[in-house]
Amino acid sequence: MGFQFFHSVLLWGMGLVLLPILIHLLRRRLVRRHKLPTFEFLLRTQRRLTTRSRLRNWILLALRVSAVSIVVLLSARPLLQMAGGESGSSWSPLHLVIVLDNSGSMAYRAAGETRLEAARKAADRLVRDLSSSDRVTVLATVEERVEGPPAIQRRDQALARLAAIGQTDAAGDPAQAVRRALESLNVPADRRTVMVFSDFARGDWDQVRVQGLRRLTPHTQLQMVRVAPEAGTDDVVLASLTLRPWPPRAGAPFSVAARIVNRGNTRKDRVPVSLFVGEERVATAELALEPGADGGTSFRIRAPEKGVLLGRVELGPDALETTNRRYFAASMGQQIRALLVDGDPQRGLLDSDTFYLASALRASPPGGDSPMLVDVVAFYELAKVRWEDYDFVAACNVGQWPARAAESLRRFVENGGGFLLAGGDLAARSLPGGGWLPAVIGGPRPLSPPGHPAVPLELQDHPVFSTLGRNPGRFFSRVRVGKIFPLSPIGPARSLLTLADGTPLLVAGPRGSGRAAVWASSCDRDWGDLPVHPVFVPFARGLVDFLGGRAKGTASMSLDAGQPLEVSPAAAGRDEAVRIRTPRGEEITLRLESSQPPSRPGAPAAQERSAPPARQGRFERTGQAGLYQVLFTEGPPQILAVNPPASEGDLEPLSDSALRERLPGVQLAFSAIRAGESNPARSVEGRTDLGPLLFLFLAGLLVVEGMLADHI
């Protein structure tokens, strides 16, 4: 309990209490004394009357000093701070702003209810206790982005707004909510209070920095109400998922690895971990975790033969279920159809230019199938080849190209295909060109001594080397290259492998919708010994997988809950609106707006009209984790996996001092409510206006002062 003053500067007016004292002293009468025996009897009577008059004068002085003091206090507007929330009866209206934290961490359950439910119950009771002249603004830390100031509501409207705020899995934006709350206090109201109901978990509040609040908060109290702090932070978090290969290919095995963290202070035995494909539980495991430790488990399953893979990993129930599941989705990829063109076919397999490459691509795990279908043709069969039947083409030492084959090969790449040109003695005689390859090729030259391939430092994480782990260059250290085509990259092409002196060995770059690459050495052992080293198989598979990527599946977009979904023009096609299906089964129509690019100066009007404007949309209601589907009029749906942000697993609360540091220049008060309280509003501190009581007291003083003054 404590006092506050709305206009504390007016308390300097307390000096006015000296005025009645000064007047009292100035009005004292100076009496001359004369001793007359005949007046002795009268003097005794006068002494009794003077004593009474003097007592009345002192009482009048005290009443007048008190009256002046009360007038000064009324001007300064005293407010009594005490538990029980804001008083609903006052001589001045109140503007109460309630900020409700509905981020994922507020789903923490204690005493049979979540922290959000406890906060809503307390806020509901506070609003019900307000008078009809008071006004309320209700905000949430996770809500749709709206333009303009927050709405100011009557009591019944505020109650409906509180009931409509739902639990989300998203990370909140408390800094924005606090600023909007303070900016909404521009309406005429003598008393202003902002109450923030939250668990103040570090995941959301650690990054809060709100500057320049002093000018927004005159005579405003910002009260931070901790919700169920006694419940603690005990929780087991599904921290991350790793899926390899991703996206998986149809019918091929892939692995799902989960990392789980015990953020509590007690050991967790037999933590259940389940893998779901669709709604079917396909695998389970159990973990034991020490306090503060993390562990992991992995599952290996086979992808569907076709269609879309929808799945999730889920932990057993605990106090915070927001952090217990993560979702994934992908459309199934098909086997890459690869065509190898042998420029020097031989009777013996080992002597063939394509033998090592074909063997590497056809390799399969025990009991499984290769993700690639490989056909081999001789160079003289190229006239019969239909490029569109393949996703990837490799030309190994091809020295003769049929008429128009090079041009049709270029169109194949531009339409999304992949092409690899490898060297050899025959390839030096004739090359498909025309400037569309990613490098200019020079005449062959030997290397003396032989060189060793190296991976440039900035390309260590390139998809071609994805299966080689960190520092993939170490696997090429013993490879010897004795002869090469000198290569000069063109445009956006990049050298994925070089010699120690920087000479390019493998150059790859985009061409239209596809990719092309040039290998400066040969596919066999004529110019180097790469094909007989263990690194050749994963390297060749990674290269073909990268170049022939149009046969790969498509992993779903992955967002943190609360982030907006951008519906791209390419996905939307000609649709003017699309339907968004949420994890709860609701279908919401999203209007797509035209995005007209600026016209180019001098462009023909007919050309400008021929290109219809692209359409795009922005869907912001992604606060619930799960699988979202964008449904188009034509074509397959776009799938979106939305997961809780990792920050929602950090439940450690910020201290009062840390909150003061993050909100400088604001008058802060702190209180707490416990989970399961029948009337949680009793624990919330509010401010009662003492103006009406002081006004009545002043009126009584004036009446008493008048009565005494009449008897003097």
Image (cartoon, grey):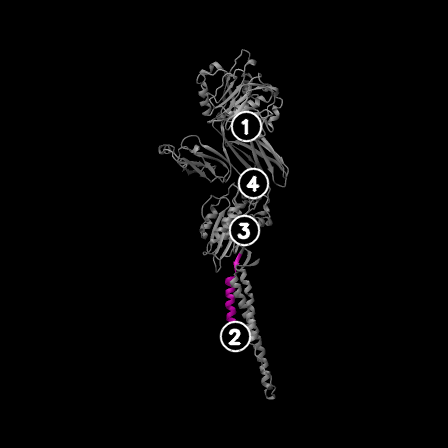
- Does residue 658 appear left or right of residue 127 in this picture? right
Where does the image place residue 363, in percent across and percent down from the top left? 55, 20
Was residue 14 drawn as part of the magenta stretch in this picture?
Answer: no
Instruction: Give the structural element (helix, strand or loop) at label 1.
Output: helix
Residue mark closest to the camera, 2 vs 3: 2
Magenta stretch: residue 693 in it? yes
Which is more toward the observer, 556 or 100? 556
Label number found at residue 463: 1
Return the disc, 2 or 3, that comes first in the chain's sequence: 3
Q: CA distance from mark 1 to mark 4?
A: 29 Å
**Disc 2 versus disc 3: distance between alpha carbons?**
51 Å
Residue beneath disc 4: 647
Please state which of the two labelled residues, at mark 1 or mark 3, is closer to the viewer.
Answer: 1
The residue type indicated by label 2 comes to Ala
Which callout, 1 or 4, points at the residue further toward the start of the chain?
Answer: 1
Distance (Cα) linking label 4 and label 2: 72 Å
Q: Position of residue 638 (x, y in %)?
A: 46, 32
Q: Tell me which numbered mark, 1 or 3, is placed earlier along the sequence.
A: 1
Q: Earlier in the sequence, mark 4 or mark 3?
A: 4
Residue behind mark 3: 680
Whether residue 704 is visible, yes or no, is yes
- The answer to whether residue 120 shows anywhere in this view is no
Whether tag 4 and tag 3 are in contact, CB under 8 A, the answer is: no
Mark 4 → mark 3, Cα distance in angstroms: 28 Å
Callout 4 touching callout 2 (CB < 8 Å)? no
The amino acid type found where label 4 is placed reads: Ser
Q: Earlier in the sequence, mark 4 or mark 2?
A: 4
Circle 3 residues within 10 Å: few <14, some 14–19, many ≥20: many
Snapshot quadrant of residue 608: top left
Residue 112 position within the rendered picture, expressed as x and y whole percent measured from the top left: 55, 44
Question: What's drawn in magenta, residue-wise?
Answer: 687-712
**Badge 3 element:** helix
